[in-house]
Image (cartoon, rainbow, N blue to C red):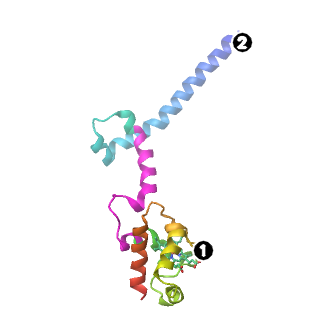
C-alpha cells in the first residue's frame, strides 16, 4: 500500500516537473518566433533556435566593443567605451572637455598615457575595461581625446 502510494507520488512529481518545464520553455519558443532572428534561421534546427536567445545575448554583451571585426577608429572606441567615464568625470576620470583636467597629464607624454590606458590606472581598468580592444584601437581613442584637449 505504502509502496503504491509513493510510486504515485513520483508519477505526480514527474508530471508536475514536466508541466513546469513546458511552462518555462513554451514562452521562449513563442517569443522566438516573432523575433527578427527567426527570419534568418527559419527552417533551421528547432533546438538551436531555442538556445539562441541566451547565447546571442551573452555574445552581444561580451563583444560589444569589438563587434564587426574591423578595427574601430578612435571616436568609435571613445564613444562606446571611454565616454562612460570621460564624458561625465565618473570615478574621478579626467573629463574630455575639461582641459584643466588634462593639463597635468599631458606633460607625461603620449606614450605614458597610452601605457596608463593599456595597463589601467587608478579607477580605470586596463583598456577602459574593454579587453577585446586591440592596442591600436585603444591608442586611437587616446589620440581622439588628446585631439580634443590640446
Ligand atoms: C571606468 C571608468 C573609465 C573608463 C571606461 C575609461 N577611463 Fe580613462 N580614466 C579613468 C580614471 C578614473 C582616470 C584617472 C586615473 C588616475 O589618474 O588615477 C583615467 C585616466 C585616463 C587617462 C590619463 C592617464 C594618465 O596617465 O594620466 C587617459 C589617457 C584615459 N583615461 C583614456 C581612456 C581611454 C582611451 C579609454 C577607453 C579605451 C578610457 N580612458 C576608459 C576612468 C575610465
- Mark 1 vs ligand 1: CB below 8 Å: yes
Whether residue 80 is visible, yes or no, is no
In this rendering, does residue 76 appear at all?
yes
Dot 2 alpha-carbon crowd within 10 angstroms: few under 14, some 14 to 19, many 20 or more? few
The main secondary structure of the magenta stretch is helix
Seen from this angle, which residue lies furthest top? 1
Q: How many marks?
A: 2
Give the residue displayed 43% in from the left and 36% down from the top. 26
Q: Quadrant of the N terminus?
A: top right
Q: Circle 1 sits on which residue?
A: 122
Does the magenta-highlighted stretch encompass residue 52?
Answer: yes
Query: Residue at position x 54%, y 78% from top?
Result: 93
Left/right placement of residue 89 relative to residue 52 reads right
Q: Which mark is residue 2?
A: 2
Tell me where the magenta segment starts and ends, as one range.
Answer: 50-77
Q: Is residue 92 magenta?
A: no
Question: The C terminus appears in which quarter of the rendering?
Answer: bottom left
- Foreground pick, 37 / 132: 132
Between circles 1 and 2, the one closer to the viewer is 1
| On screen, residue 89 above or below 56 | below
Instruction: Give the quadrant of residue 135.
Output: bottom left
Q: Secondary structure at mark 1?
A: loop
Closest to the observer, 12 or 32:
32
Q: CA distance from mark 1 to mark 2?
A: 67 Å
Compared with 10, 49 (above or below) is below
Q: Is residue 90 above or below residue 130?
A: below
Amino acid at each position: 500500500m505504502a509502496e503504491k502510494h509513493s510510486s504515485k507520488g513520483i508519477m505526480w512529481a514527474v508530471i508536475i516537473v514536466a508541466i513546469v518545464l513546458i511552462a518555462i520553455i513554451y514562452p521562449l519558443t513563442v517569443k522566438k518566433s516573432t523575433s527578427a532572428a527567426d527570419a534568418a534561421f527559419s527552417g533551421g534546427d528547432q533546438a538551436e533556435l531555442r538556445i539562441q536567445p541566451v547565447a546571442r545575448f551573452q555574445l552581444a554583451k561580451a563583444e560589444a566593443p569589438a563587434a564587426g571585426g574591423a578595427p574601430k577608429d578612435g571616436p568609435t572606441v571613445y564613444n562606446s567605451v571611454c565616454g562612460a567615464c570621460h564624458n561625465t568625470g565618473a570615478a574621478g576620470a579626467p573629463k574630455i572637455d575639461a582641459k584643466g583636467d588634462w593639463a597635468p597629464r599631458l606633460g607625461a607624454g603620449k606614450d605614458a598615457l597610452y601605457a596608463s590606458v593599456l595597463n589601467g590606472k587608478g579607477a580605470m581598468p586596463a583598456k577602459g575595461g574593454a579587453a577585446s580592444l586591440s592596442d591600436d584601437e585603444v591608442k586611437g581613442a587616446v589620440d581622439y581625446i588628446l585631439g580634443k584637449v590640446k
